[in-house]
DNA sequence: CAAAATAGTTAGTCATGCCTAAATTCGACG
DNA sequence: CGTCGAATTTAGGCATGACTAACTATTTTG
């Protein structure tokens, strides 16, 4: 257990870097300087400098010219920020009338300012939810969280909306089709109509509508924007 | 009207200085460098430096060796912070189970992080209160606020608590008595018992109890910790 | 496989906001 | 009216965290 006794307080910058690196290391691969710079909107040398400071504090490991990986301590900080962010979003949507798509910026600032005690009170007021309004899992105070449960587009009831998360096909032809149709991860769609007997389904996306065959739609994996 | 169009964003420090200066200028007199330094826990040279920067931005006026006064723009910023602070305290007490005396630190950090929109949503959820849990008036979004209404200690019902705000006597003997009894502005007391026919009243203060004559108690002015 | 393109790092600068030490100013008092 | 002491300001330094310019390592490609 890597204890982190009596560490000096983390700055807002440090928290943002660690959260960004956590997000970028979903694949388990080392994270590049320029990916961090792009995500945070900073110059590459600024990131290089911060990487040095963070690795001196054992929050990440740096192989020069190769990239960085979070240490256990760094991941702990990142997961604490993820928990804060997602709980704040859930709270603002449930109790203060924010909508799904407007909470992000507010949470981005608040996550650095709330105390541990306030976060736990908010969690309790929400009934200790395990997922946020975007369907993303909320880590518990130890950093453990549920896996995301993806729902195929075919299983989203007509009239509901969902966000595309993963496309479960390797066929280039299908990927190309989905791409030009705008059906990429991160896109929100509303399901309009299911034809019976495993027929095509009609969805609204942005301004227009699309009709998707059942077989392809089964490979479009979504999350639904509910607080569960 | 001193417009403040397209000003650069204010830092947390700047907001804290302006709020402190506002608090210290209750009398309308210029505020001294050392009073600001004491209140914020900073060295006098640090305050001197910040005063220079703030007066360059026309947030305050500085007469060297004489003290500072807020400009209209500076007062506007200060009142916005006061509004935020008091609304946040009220919100945390009403909706998240904080007690009167533990909200301050949390509000102190949050007041710099919440957006204008969130503050207004919180105000609305509270029913646009005009006073915070300490009885202090909450400025409206234009900076206007009600005067504090003081209640004489004699008018606080038995069983209730109040905070002493002002002592309305100039008699040194009485002031000395109140001082040694611990009955100074800022002290919280609980009223235990009123003797009939304008007799003395018994109050609890800290650990012990005191019995105060009716005439003197009438001059001890309080506010009551309710959200009105 | 070498050169060009790309990615990453080092060097040096700047703004903010804090500090201590050393002047300076003001006001009071003999 | 001069001197002493307290308050204030100036001078100079430091940490954080950003930037640009210049250099170096790696990867891609003809």
Image (spheres, coloured by chain):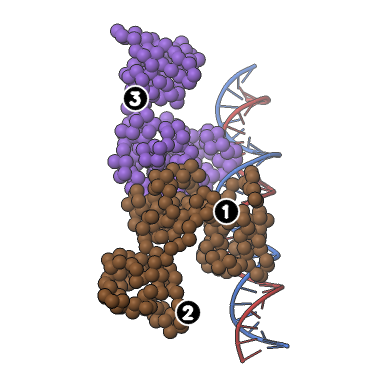
Chain colours: A brown, B purple, C blue, D red
Residue B125 appears in view = yes
Residues at discs 1 and 3 both on one chain: no
Give coordinates of residue A140: x percent, y percent. Answer: 50, 51
Question: Where is mark 3, residue-wise?
Answer: B150
Per the model, the C-alpha gap separating discs 2 and 3 is 74 Å
- Residue at x-position 38% and y-position 16%: B192
Label 1: element kind: helix
Q: On what subunit does the disc labeled 1 rest?
A: A
The chain letter for the residue carrying disc 2 is A
Quick check: do tags 2 and 1 share a chain? yes
Query: Does B126 sit left or right of B52 as displayed?
Result: left
Question: Do the CB atoms of the residues marked 2 and 1 lie less than 8 Å apart?
Answer: no
Label 1 sits on residue: A76
From the top left corner, tell me how far across and down residue B122 is, in percent.
35, 45
Mark 1 or 3: the one toward you: 1
Q: In whole angstroms, how far apart are the C-alphas of marks 1 and 3?
A: 50 Å
The residue drawn where x is 54% and y is 44% is B50
Q: Secondary structure at mark 3?
A: loop
Characterize the local packing of mark 2: few (<14), some (14-19) or many (20 or more) Cα atoms within 10 angstroms: few
What crowding class fits label 1: few (fewer than 14 Cα within 10 Å), some (14-19), or many (20 or more)?
A: many
Would residue A12 be seen by someone viewing this image from the given angle? Answer: no
Tell me if mark 3 has few (under 14), some (14-19) or many (20+) residues whose alpha carbon lies within 10 angstroms of its own: some
Residue at image mark 2: A170
Q: Residue at x 32, y 52 (%)?
A: A97
Which image quadrant is residue A206 in?
bottom left
Q: How many marks?
A: 3
């Amino acid at each position: 257990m890597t204890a982190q006794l009596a560490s000096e307080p983390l700055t807002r910058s440090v928290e943002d870097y660690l959260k960004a690196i956590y997000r970028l290391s979903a694949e388990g691969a080392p994270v590049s300087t320029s990916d961090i710079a792009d995500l945070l909107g900073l110059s590459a040398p600024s990131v290089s400098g911060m990487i040095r400071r963070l690795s001196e504090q054992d929050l990440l490991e740096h192989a020069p010219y190769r990239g960085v990986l979070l240490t256990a301590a760094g991941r702990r900080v990142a997961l604490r920020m993820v928990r804060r962010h997602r709980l704040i979003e859930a709270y603002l949507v449930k109790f203060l009338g924010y909508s799904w798509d407007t909470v992000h910026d507010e949470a981005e600032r608040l996550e650095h300012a709330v105390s541990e005690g306030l976060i736990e009170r908010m969690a309790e007021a929400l009934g200790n939810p395990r997922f946020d309004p975007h369907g993303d899992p909320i880590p518990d105070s130890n950093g453990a969280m549920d896996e995301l449960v993806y729902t195929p587009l075919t299983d989203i009831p007509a009239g509901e909306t969902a966000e595309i998360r993963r496309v479960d096909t390797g066929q280039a032809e299908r990927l190309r089709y989905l791409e030009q149709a705008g059906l990429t991860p991160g896109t929100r769609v509303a399901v309009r109509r299911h034809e019976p007997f495993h027929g095509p389904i009609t969805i609204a996306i942005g301004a227009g509508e699309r009709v998707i065959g059942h077989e392809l739609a089964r490979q479009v994996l979504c999350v639904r924007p509910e607080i569960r």
